[in-house]
Amino acid sequence: MSKAKSPQNPKKFKGPNAGVAVACMGYMLCSSLMLIANKLAVHFFEAPGIVLILQLGLTAVCVKAAGMAGIIEVDDLEWKKVKPYTLVAVAFLATIYTNIKTLQFANVETFIVFRASTPILVSVGDWLFLGRELPSLRSAMCLFGLLLGAIGYVLTDSKPEISGYAWVFVWYGVFCFDQIYLKHAADSVKMKSNWGKVYYSNLLACVPLAIISIMTSEAEMVSTMPSIEAILAVGLSCILGVAMSYFAWLARTLVSAAYFTVVGNTCKIITIIINRFIWDKHANNIGLGFLSVCLMCAYFYKQAPKRKGKPALPL
């Protein structure tokens, strides 16, 4: 991928922005591992709502505890910040929940290839709401290549699953909104540190998630002691949840919404390699070839600059 400029003190960096590189690499690694960890977690512990409560709750508790101990700086709860972050939490929660539901009914590659096409819609959202230019010719060709790769993959999917695709489409719309609004919140809601964003988003997401779990009676599904495999899988996903939340907010602050979406896609080849070794529900080689086209196009995508003149539409 092309290098991105940080919106904060751009003149400070003559060469590559180390902060952007660390944020993006950290997010890419956590995103790759988190997809596999979630797949394992819901396989051994078939209660996705409870898995999410554990992930979000542990993140919020650990961040707040570290803040109280003086290890990191964490914002206190304030209504002027809680109000916009309530929608952040709802969008964040809906994205993760539909993500996990998708992974219950579809193979990992099916999810990945649909994600590979999301920068097309997100880049339009960048232009409409976040003050970015439309993609350049090169970037537009890359996004078009992502779409062709996605279509090719779907046509060669060796194990089409109707229920899985239905959840993918639900996730698709929720995810694009999430990418655009969370970037808006990261830029417009001032926090003392990145940990404040992590704390607010995870803590506020726990409330609606608890309601959903009660409504779906998932607690009744866990009437027996979880297996060692389930405990390890869920524990791993919780640890990765803390790291991924931090790097995701850090990267989201430094780059555009579309670029952030593309960054997430570039790490998926790692997920595919891991998935082919540990899971039996993978796509055929032709399908993986189309997915490689998607990732190649994502690699050559270039972030659109801020546009001058006409203002963006308010969110």
Image (cartoon, rainbow, N blue to C red):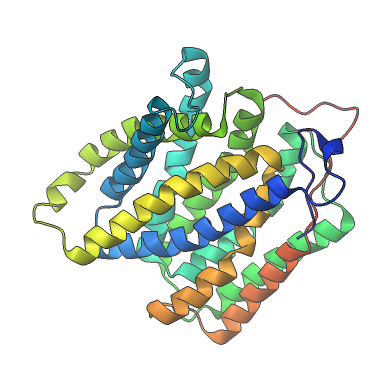
Residue at image coords 88%, 57%: 137
Q: Look at the image and tell me in which quarter the C terminus lies.
A: top right
Image position of 299 (left or right of 245) = right
| Residue 7 spot, x, y in % from top left | 77, 36
Q: Look at the image and tell me in which quarter the N terminus lies.
A: bottom right
In the rendered image of this protein, does residue 222 appear above or below residue 196?
Answer: below
| Residue 50 spot, x, y in % from top left | 26, 46
Residue 121 visible in rendering: no
Residue at image coords 67%, 43%: 257
- Which quadrant of the structure image shows residue 266? bottom right
| Residue 314 spot, x, y in % from top left | 70, 24
- Which quadrant of the structure image shows residue 225? bottom left
| Residue 254 spot, x, y in % from top left | 69, 40
- Give the farthest residue toward the left: 224
Between 67 and 302, the one lying in front of the other is: 67
In the rendered image of this protein, does residue 63 appear above or below residue 30?
Answer: above
In the rendered image of this protein, does residue 177 appear above or below residue 15?
Answer: above
Image position of 213 (left or right of 239) = left
Between 304 and 217, the one lying in front of the other is: 304
- Give the farthest residue toward the top: 79
- Which quadrant of the structure image shows residue 185? top right
Residue at image coords 63%, 48%: 23
